[in-house]
Each structure stands twice: as structure tokens, then as C-alpha cells.
Image (cartoon, rainbow, N blue to C red):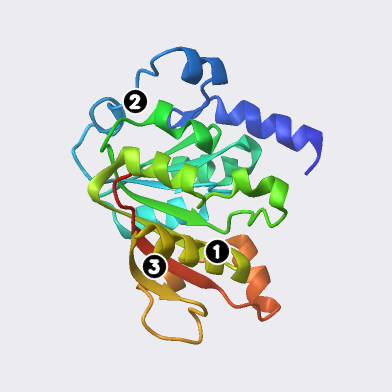
Amino acid sequence: MGSKNKLKRFKENNTFNHVFQPLRSELVEEAYPLKGNWNKLFFKNNNPLVLELGCGKGEYTIGLAKRYPNKNFIGIDTKGARFWRGAKTASNDKMTNVAFIRAQIELIQSLFATSEVDEIWITFPDPQIKYKRTKHRMTNTAFLQRYRSILKPEGTVNLKTDSEFMHGYTLGLLHGEGHDVLYANHDIYRQEGSPSEVTEIQTYYENQYLEHNKAITYIKFKIKNY
């Protein structure tokens, strides 16, 4: 993407009332005003709150929001020019149950209060295969602790990935730490049983993976209290 396109998208993101781009200092050093108040102050209802972490272009955030109009959805990514596509679609379609946040996932506890979130989706994250990068792996113990703190007691996490490594690593960790694996499938398009939103909503990159016959995996789980 050219620098002019990026600047244009950044500029348009600033005009959307459903896009939030807090400074890191606002999240680290101050109490973010929407923390604990997303439904009250922004969505203005008490519907379930669902997050997509590392939302990319926002295909899952938008797809789920259209499928479930009685739930609220927030896509989070560090790349504002990337999620501009989802934000633009939400604006064009006048969707009132969608928001996007430009922020780092490790700061999620500064964005959401204890038990504020009902469900989390993690779609095609970087598996961070190299050992030095394990601290950035989005299903490691530290991240699971962060998710647990903002999820409601019965809250769930969904992981959809093309990485057999990420799938296997996450399953092993979940079983090893005693979390509750509700469903697991290592090839959702060749094995039946996955929820419809897992196979009927597809991302841009997922379509590319499927063209190369890569298996797409899925896990749904609950995180125990640490």
C-alpha cells in the first residue's frame, strides 16, 4: 500500500465516530474513560460485547456484527490503515453495533474492565514460531491471563488459524493448564461440526490459504481462573 493511501486512510479513520485511537500514554498512565463503559457510553445498550483481536481488515468483526445485530463488536489492531476497510464498511452500511480500536493487544486490560467482555475471537494471528518471539504469541499464558481478567465468568475464546503449529501449541497449553476446551477441529472445511460462523465468514488471507489447500483450524475454549 502506498504512503498516500495510508495517509488518506488514517485521515478518514479520524472522521469515524466508531474508530478509537488512544495514545499509548493514555492507556498506560491514565484511566481510559471508556474502560468499563463501552456499552453504556458508546453502544448505549446492554448487549453482549465481543472482541476480535488482531482484526486485520475487520472481516470477522463486520461479518459477525451483521450476523448478530443484537451483539456489540469491537475489532482491535495496531494497523489503522488495515482496519480502515472494516470501519469504512461499518460507516457505509450504517452499522451501530461495530467499533474499531487502534491499540496493542497487550494493553487490553487498560481498555476493558473486569468481566466486561462476553467473547473473544483471535483470527489468523502471527504464530510467532521463533523462540525469542514466544512472548508475543497471542495464546501464551500471559495473554490468556489478560483475556481471563476482562472476560465474564462464562466468557469464551475462539482461535481460527492456518498454522498447525499455533493450533497444536494452543491445544497443548490449554490442556496442560487445565482450561476447558469446548471444541477443536484441525481442518474445518473437511471435517464437519464447526459453528456456521467459523466456515461462512472468511478473511482475505483465509481465501488465499484455501487456494493453496492449507487446512484451517479452530478451537473454542474457556479460560480457568488463575
* Residue 197: assigned label: 3
- Label 2 Cα crowd, 10 Å radius (few <14 / some 14-19 / many 20+): some
Kindly identify the amino acid type of the residue bearing the numbered disc 3.
Answer: Glu
SS at mark 2 in the image: loop
The residues tagged by marks 2 and 3 sit, at their Cα atoms, a distance apart of 28 Å
Kindly identify the amino acid type of the residue bearing the numbered disc 2.
Answer: Lys
Residue on which the image places disc 2: 35
In this rendering, the answer to whether 174 lies above or below 212 is above
Lateral position of residue 138 relative to residue 155, left or right: right
Q: Residue at x 47, y 66 (%)?
A: 171
Residue 64: image x %, image y %? Answer: 38, 57
Residue 9: image quadrant is top right
Residue on which the image places disc 1: 169
Residue 86: image x %, image y %? Answer: 52, 46
Lateral position of residue 113 relative to residue 184, left or right: left
Q: Nearer the viewer, residue 69 or 108?
A: 108
The residues tagged by marks 1 and 2 sit, at their Cα atoms, a distance apart of 31 Å
